[in-house]
Amino acid sequence: MRRFLWSFALLTAVALAAGLAGCSGGGSAKVAAGKRIVILTNGNSPFWDACRKGVSEAEKDLKLADAGLKAELDVNDGTPKGQIDKLRQYASRADVVAVGVSALDASNAEVADRMRELQAKGIKVITVDSDVDRDQMRDTRFAFVGTDNLAGGKELGKCAKGLRPDGGKYVTFVGRLGAQNAKERINGFAEGAGSKFQSLDSMGDNIDLIKARENVRNAITNHQAKGLNVLVGIWSYNAPAIVDVVKEKNVRDKFTVVTFDAEPGAIDEMGQGQIDAMVVQNPFKMGYDGVKLLKALVEDDKDTVKKMLPEHGKPNGDVYDTGLKVVVPDADTPLKADMFDAKTEVLKLGAFREWLKKYGLTGS
Amino acid sequence: MASDPTPAPAVRPALGIARFFQRTEWGLVLAIGVVLLVTVGLDTDHVYWHNPGPSVKDIVRQTVLLGIFALGAAVVIIAGGIDLSAGSVIAFSGTICATLLLWLAPDAVRLNQPLPLWVMTVACLGALLSGFLIGSLHAWLITVVGLPPFVATLATLVGLRSLSRALVAYVNQNSTQIPIPNREFRALANELWIPIAVCLALLAAVWLLMSRTVVGRHLYALGGNENAARLSGVPTDRLKWLAYCVSAVLSSVAGILYVASVAVVEPETLGKGYELNAIAAAVVGGCSLQGGIGSIPGTLLGALFLRVVMDGVAKIIKSSADVYEGLIVGVVVAVAVAFTQLRQAGRGGVRFFSGGLGLAAIVNLSLFAGVLLALLLRESELGGWTIFGSVAALVAVLLTGVRFAEGRRHKQK
Amino acid sequence: MPPVIEIKHVTKRFPGVVALDDVSVDIERGELHAVVGENGAGKSTLMKILSGVIPEHEGEFLLRGRPVRFAGTRDAEAVGVSIIHQELNLVEQLSAAANIFLGREKRTRLGFLDDAAMERAAGDLLVQLECSVSPRQPVRELRVGDQQLVEIAKALSLEAEILIMDEPTSALAESEVARLFRVIDRLRRRGVTILYISHKMDEVFHLADRITVLRDGRLIRTLRRADTGPREVTHLMVGREIENVRLGDGREPGAVVLEVRHLSLPWTGHARRWRLHDVSFSLRRGEIVGIAGLMGAGRTELLECLFGSSPEPPQGQILLEGREVHFTHPAQAKRAGVALVTEDRKRLGLFANLDVGENITVCTLREAAASGLVRWGKQRRMAEGVVRDLGVKTAGIDVAITSLSGGNQQKAIIGRWLLTKPKVLLLDDPTRGVDVGAKAELYRLMDRLCREGLGVVVTSSELPELLTVCDRILVLCEGRLTGEFGRAEATEQRIMEAATMRS
């Protein structure tokens, strides 16, 4: 019996040592003294691949290794508990010095508390991509790096208005109805589209790609008779989902398709005329500037912080906008630059592809 | 002829002290210690050593939550059944709890105002009641309708989550979740002593039930040999009712605490897949899925072991540890249970790598080791293919050596 | 004094069968009443009705003059009737004491289990039964004989006045049987009424005051032991005279087909270390070799070694037709021409879910298949051939195997293995649970197969059986070979001496 216990212990030790020695050995050569800047996502989608590019570009550009730092993207499983568990884990580790969170739910009180806890331990916290509730939880982060989603929604609404001047009826498709960016985009869309447009439904799919297609199918079946003619994709993967179903049902001529973000698939579809307009954020810049801001905070580099957020301390001075693009097909389109906000860049698809190529991106 | 028969067999039965020390629990305590030591050594920041506080808190929090419903899983397993529904019962009871909160005090929940104590009490009791009803439903499906436990609880596993989503959509204006921001409610999980106290109280109660009461003895008998139990006048159907109720009610307790700890009920994701963690904890803790064998403190230690391994992996790998979590937990569970099995069967002369299947196992393990190390060492200067090739080759050579040694030993006999 | 039990016109119908047909018996207080009959005669059904296991039946029975009807075993126990089942009904994972008090646990004043008290009481009971096991030992670690005594202790703990024993010796070694008989004697002196079910004549005539014979669910007759003899009772059971079988004359053994040299089978983690130690013998074509020995002597293990199904790999040499073989799986043994008919038919032999034909062809289905698909016609012909050849009494090859009597099930399984065209046939206690008439048929079948050139190894727990069919008898004791007797020299006396010869 004793022998069993000892052999058990020994084997466990050997197995774990063998399994893990390598990773800490190999990985730690560079990291040993390294402190980490972590960008924590809300879920998983190609959107974050572009962000990851930005993170590693910043790591190289800003010479993080020289400062004893390392930057990485940590992908959450799409659940609130996953995000909370990860934030707890950061708090119990010694190597995490700065965290950028893409809040899964804007008003989740527990996520907010965990972010406050991190700050209390001296860890720098910002939000990226999706902010926390700005009325009640602004204190949980130093700043927000991302897109003004309300503005983005407005621009998408203006696209719909430009494409259907007589108005119409629309359904919005999104991963999680509770996410702050989703709420803002949907509200923004209504505002930008104007009073001639009427919302028939908002459908959430919980980041289930199959469910996303089912939602589109159900929307067309249930609402076409009521005059549905605009399909709005709010999260990046909703675009290909909409296009797939529209093609499958062969109803392209009956619907205007406007979407958020530019997944690689969505870019191709626009090339084939399946999407009328896309409002594109800049996840690459979110990753890059997120790391840049966190590095400055960690090093107490006031100049850089000042440069990035000149208005910090004033209302909305803690929002760092990474900019918007409206992408339209190369073919003739009624959408013109003067319909949109002055800060928004309006690109033909070809020019947008050039831009992606420059940064080695496949989507945005 | 009349002489006493062969005084023969049997290893002298180990009784008393000796038997006490050969229990699975000691192996687990030892294994937990080993994992902690390994983590201290391999974690480049040595947080367990320098600043153990937050890690201990985190492990304890996760362990008590998992432990609570793993105890329920253990009771059912010991009684010879299986409960696959734990994860969905967590989601459902959480939903019931949140729904009651929202109905009884809509303003308090929506506007984050103080929540009256009676509202919280009613909501929690409602959740527990829902657990009791689900357990009764399981017992009815199994003992009266005659469904196998696997099917009955599989049905509720799928059904209850769906029902919870529909319920949430109904009570909260088509939303997929009900946020519960109230500090008083979240304190149930955030004041760490509360879940610890709940877990320890339940551990004591279930331990006492299973080891010191007639009902507990009968549950062991039921799992060991249902026929014999019935012929001995043991009320088997009533015991099953009890077992499935204990399991479902403990899952509801865990459900309430999980909701309190994430401040939101989201039936789509809450507790998804947790039933398997509970069963794994029970099995690692020494429960036999054939029934009749199992230990309550062992189950809690099993839960602790799983959480310590998961936390250790996170501490050592650091970036995106959860990607490897399932892999390592799977390996650990298989190894732990294989050890128990080998020990019980006393199969000294097993040949692990003989014949065609043994050959396939060598290929499997070599590839597995190669892929694993290539992935873990992806940041090193050596190319992934080099690492994969050399590790796989090394393991293959080693195991082939073992294969030959086994063959030789066999021949010598 | 009125009879303690009066059974009046009890009839029990199962779907399609009348298990008991208008049976009436009186049991006197304090007597040992044997109930005998072939398998399927209705003995067990009657006892299950008396003990409340089967609550539904026609007719009535009176206990101590009052009519009673039990809804379950608990009701029966409450009035002092308890039963010891043929298949042991114990929870293997629990201790002996916990099993003895299962369902009626002793409690402390606080309502918790009082293990100490139960272990004390269980210890006392076991001592009365000459059983030396610790009450704290899990039942799975006990030998079958001791498990049987735990069952009896359980019945005694109820202070039963009427004890029903359903073939209690079927799993016991002879020394354990002797111990059981001493226990029974002691119970009778205490005034316990015992209903003893058996089909072994020697036991019945050793113990019983009166004997009731059942056949095909009907009461044939109740006799005083003093007024009758085994011959008459057997005749009543079977319904015809059993001829005395004389077999084996003029058989001519041929070349050696199987040779075993220094075979040893280790027993890891066991005090005895060897299940079998240094066993050597040979078997010729056309020869039947018997293996005698007490329970646990290693008979089954020896056959398992020859068939490649032993729990651990054996050491030593096994030569089949002069070539050394190492079987690690029965599939290899089957290919090489060795067949084993296992001891525990229900658990290790029959596929209860398959019909007679499928049971017969299960080992040789590949031969009935063309390009991977089974040809039903060919399979049918194979099965029908066996049924005809061995005289299996069945309504057809597509009825459930469980509808056949024990003897015919056994023939079907032997037929299954004959289809593999074996050179060596291993039979592990083939007549266990087979009734008297069918036994003789099995003996004749063995004789015929042997004369056709097969080498046969057979084990049995009944010595007269081995003496009837075997050319030679090997005796095992504690895994060692302690005797070998030719047909002429073998007697029960000499075999028993060898079987109890300890080192």
Image (cartoon, grey):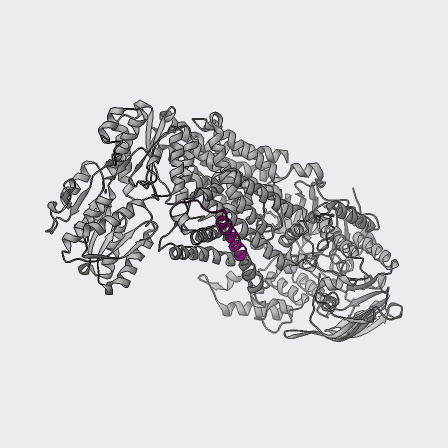
| Nearer to me, C455 or C27 | C27
| Residue B338 showing in the rendered view | no
Above or below A76: residue A197: below
Front-lying residue, B403 or B32: B32
Residue A181 belongs to the span the image colors magenta: no
Tell me if B14 is positioned left or right of A285 in this view. Answer: right
Instruction: Read off the magenta span.
Output: B112-134
Considering only vertical position in the picture, is C97 above or below B329? below
* Residue B233 rendering spot, x and y as whole percentages: 69, 59
Q: Taking B169 as reference, is B117 above or below it?
A: above
Residue drawn where x is 32% and y is 51% of the image: A209
Query: Main SS type for the magenta part?
Result: helix
Q: What quarter of the picture does the C terminus of chain C occupy?
A: top right
Q: Position of residue B175 (x, y in %)?
A: 35, 53
Residue C377 x %, y %: 50, 70
Tell me if residue C16 comes above or below residue A335 in the rendering.
Answer: below
